[in-house]
Amino acid sequence: MRLSFGQALTTFFVDATRKARRRVIAGAIVAASLVAAAIEGTSAARHALEPSLGPVGARLVLAGAFVLIGTGAVLTLLWAERRAEQRDAARRPYADGDARAAILAEAISLGYALGRDFMKASPDGQAASAEDEAFDRSADRPASSPGAGQTRPAA
């Protein structure tokens, strides 16, 4: 059985959405499990620290641990962003050169295309220059002079 283009496209999108839906559900379950584990781990750590530090000291130690974890995460993100900017800055000179080369190639291509169109537009297949158009060959004088287009009397 052959599928039409529309049927194949529909089948592709249905399969892709099913796959995406399964991944989203699995990701939500993993995220909820990680949140529950963090809550339970924090509670267990607080209960373990209370006998030696007291209830307030245990909470302060956990708060300090969370501040350190958060600071480490922010510093890691800033470091990664700075490295990405350095990588982009290192690539920029090449990108500018490529842009100039692309503009040059486009100009050459445009000039070639215009020249080809002018060649096709001229009646004898050769491009007429501006001088050729300004000079009336039948009168041997410029086209703008009086009597242009008239033939010379026979001598």
Image (cartoon, grey):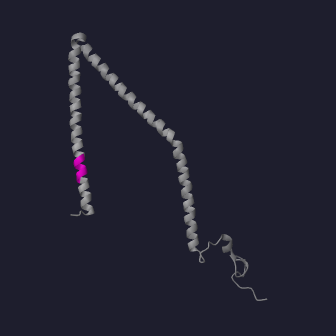
- Number of numbered labels in the structure image: 0
Residue 90: % across, % down: 51, 39
Say whether residue 143 is visible. Answer: no
Query: Looking at this rendering, what residue extends furthest in the front direction?
Result: 1
Q: Is residue 149 left or right of residue 47?
A: right
Query: Looking at this rendering, what residue extends furthest in the right direction?
Result: 155
Report which quarter residue 47 is drawn in. top left
Q: Is residue 73 left or right of residue 45?
A: right
> Is residue 70 positioned above or below 48 on the image?
below
Residue 77: % across, % down: 39, 31
Q: Residue at x 50, y 41 (%)?
A: 91
| Magenta stretch: dominant secondary structure | helix
Say whether residue 51 is visible. Answer: yes
Q: Residue at x 20, y 20 (%)?
A: 44
Q: Which residues are magenta?
A: 14-19
**Quarter of the C terminus within the rendering:** bottom right
Query: Looking at this rendering, what residue extends furthest in the bottom direction?
Result: 154
Front residue of this view, candidates 144 and 69 = 69
The answer to whether residue 116 is magenta is no
**Quarter of the N terminus within the rendering:** bottom left
Residue 71: % across, % down: 36, 25
Report which quarter residue 2 is drawn in. bottom left
Report which quarter residue 151 is drawn in. bottom right
Query: Looking at this rendering, what residue extends furthest in the top direction?
Result: 52
Residue 60: % across, % down: 28, 16
Q: Residue at x 60, y 77 (%)?
A: 124
Q: Is residue 153 left or right of residue 40?
A: right
